[in-house]
Amino acid sequence: MSIGAKYSFIMKKPQILNRIHSPRDLDRLSQEEIKQLAQEIRIFLVESISKTGGHLASNLGVVELTLAIHRVFESPFDKILWDVGHQSYTHKILTGRRDKFHTLRQEKGLSGFPKSCESVHDAFIGGHSSNSISAGYGIAKALSLKGDQHHVVTVIGDGSFTGGMVYEAFNNAGRNHDNLIVILNHNDMSISKNVGAFAKYLSSIRSKPGYRNLKRNVEKILQKVPLVGERVIGSLISSKSLLKKWIYNTTFFEEMGFEYLGPIDGHNYEELKAALETAKNMKCPVVVHVDTTKGKGYPYAEQNPGAYHGVSTFDIYTGNPDVSPKESYSTVFGQYLVKLAQKDPKICAVTAAMKYGTGLQYFYAKFKDRFFDVGIAEQHAVTFCAGLASQGFHPVFAVYSSFLQRGYDQIIHDCAIEQQHVVFCIDRAGIVGDDGETHQGIFDVSFLSSIPNITIYAPESYQELKIMLYQALYHTHAVVAVRYPRGAESIQHHLVCQEYQDFLYEQHGTQILIITYGRITNQAYQAMESLRQQQKSVSILKLLKLSPIPSKVLDLAKQYQSIFFFEEGIKKGGIGQELLSDLYESGFCGQMRIVAIEDEFVKQASVDSTFKHYGFDKDSMIEMIQKQSF
């Protein structure tokens, strides 16, 4: 029987899952029923995510762990936090959201991440990594100050330990005696394979099974001792025994002030439950080290967890995506960077645990000595690039727009002040759609354009991406950013450059001018053409260089009576506002309307739906221009 057929057959008659409506329903289940429930949840996840897309492998790996957490702790009185939130789906299922799971990552549906506004069981938002221990410590301290003895449980993957914020949190939390339990979910993965010294350190702990095996044998003996056996077992688990120190010496966590339990088999419910109960009774900061398998229970995901980390819809029978992968901005960037690096030995590629997401797998395959995956550590990545640049190399940091936010100080202090030549290739710029507020790439233009001596390019086509990357590497000084959206190009016009230009301009009269940049140029051009067919003259100017704004753009714009600036980003501090200010300072007497994202966060929805909501689609542009100009 095929994998898909087996899963579908079992899910026709779920025996346990339909009985679970809240975490307390777990209390009535036997150990065998818990095992069956874990299997049913995995099947439910595979079938559901195959239809909606989402994060699969990470969620399959924490089913037993989530069941044990909710059996031992009482949410929402005990607070449960999920670092990043890629592994929170079972938590959502157990906390009354299974019936809405078909709406996952859809407009007005369930978020793909924990959100406190979605459920009282989501103690803190999760979208970016490495923040859960800091937030958890803050919540634990607040509970202590209120005299509340409930616990705070944070679940954090070993991949998130490549982010420096984790160590800042450990440094503070371990000095206190609040009820904070950190569950280290060790699966050797973030999205790509984990890197760095800490990954090796955790592997060294995992490779010493002596303590775990000896403890099991001692427990079996003690369980046969009448009356006192169980009490002695509890003492053995919770104490820092000489035996434990002999095998492990002292763990990093204990040096930071935390008690340490583990490693625990993350797919053995009874072991997990016992360890969590022990941690709960300690009444102090504890790390519970859990070993799990990312993708557990679905062979395709187990064999290739990176490929099944975040998936679109797919066929459960074959594991293949419903839509064949297309060429994208990410792949075009990655392949062209390889072509440039073949001729230029000074080009280095840097990623923050997103080798595949940013298209740098091609560079890694060709130039391993010049490829650097620094882990989930954007701050370090930026300054590392500045160090490379200071010695004459050409570092290219490929990073998602929403993740670059974490390196803002380093861009200013370590790169811009001394004008180090670092190239930021900003992927997922603009609206990203179903990942929602935490991943929308709408802030980078505003926060970058305010930095002195920075240059920002915004190609619309693959060809322009190559041209702008070359320009950034060889004809632009200091800090340079090249920003491009998620997915594939979609261009139905001819306003595309074939060699470097700051902007492209097509004139049709001198009354109305559309100015825009990036992929919404496609919508703007179609709007202009539709208006022209109605005998209404509208010109268009596409910016390729956003910052500094080319002086000739001001000269052209001042000729028009009405200007409409469409910007797929936040309005405050955007290029539209900068241009408006420059125009009026230079004597512009016409009117300018900026259409951008007002003072709000963009919710999850399809890109097309979001475009329509904010007025970035062709029809909305036409309606606005007609209403205000003719």
Image (cartoon, rainbow, N blue to C red):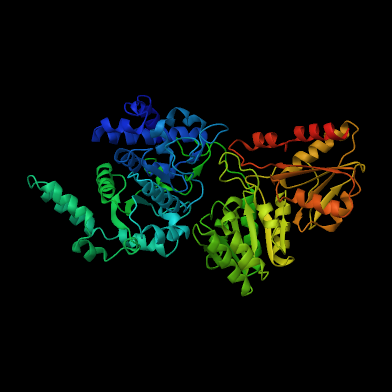
x, y percent for residue 246: 22, 66
Q: Is residue 197 above or below residue 86?
A: below
Screen quadrant of the C terminus: top right
x, y percent for residue 88: 43, 41
Q: Is residue 229 visible?
A: yes
* Residue at position x 36%, y 26% in the image: 18
> Of all residues shown, which one is farthest toward the bottom?
391
x, y percent for residue 11: 38, 28
Q: Is residue 290 left or right of residue 99?
A: left
Q: In front here: 595 or 299?
A: 595
Q: Is residue 491 visible?
A: no
Q: Is residue 612 above or below residue 202?
A: above
* Residue at position x 73%, y 45% in the image: 567
Please tell me in which quadrant of the rendered image residue 255 appears.
bottom left
Q: Is residue 312 left or right of residue 150?
A: right
Q: Is residue 349 left or right of residue 534?
A: left
Q: Count the labels in the image.
A: 0
> Of all residues shown, which one is farthest toward the left?
226
Screen quadrant of the N terminus: top left
Q: Is residue 344 above or below residue 2?
A: below
Q: Is residue 339 left or right of residue 158?
A: right
x, y percent for residue 316: 45, 35
> Of all residues shown, which one is farthest toward the top?
13
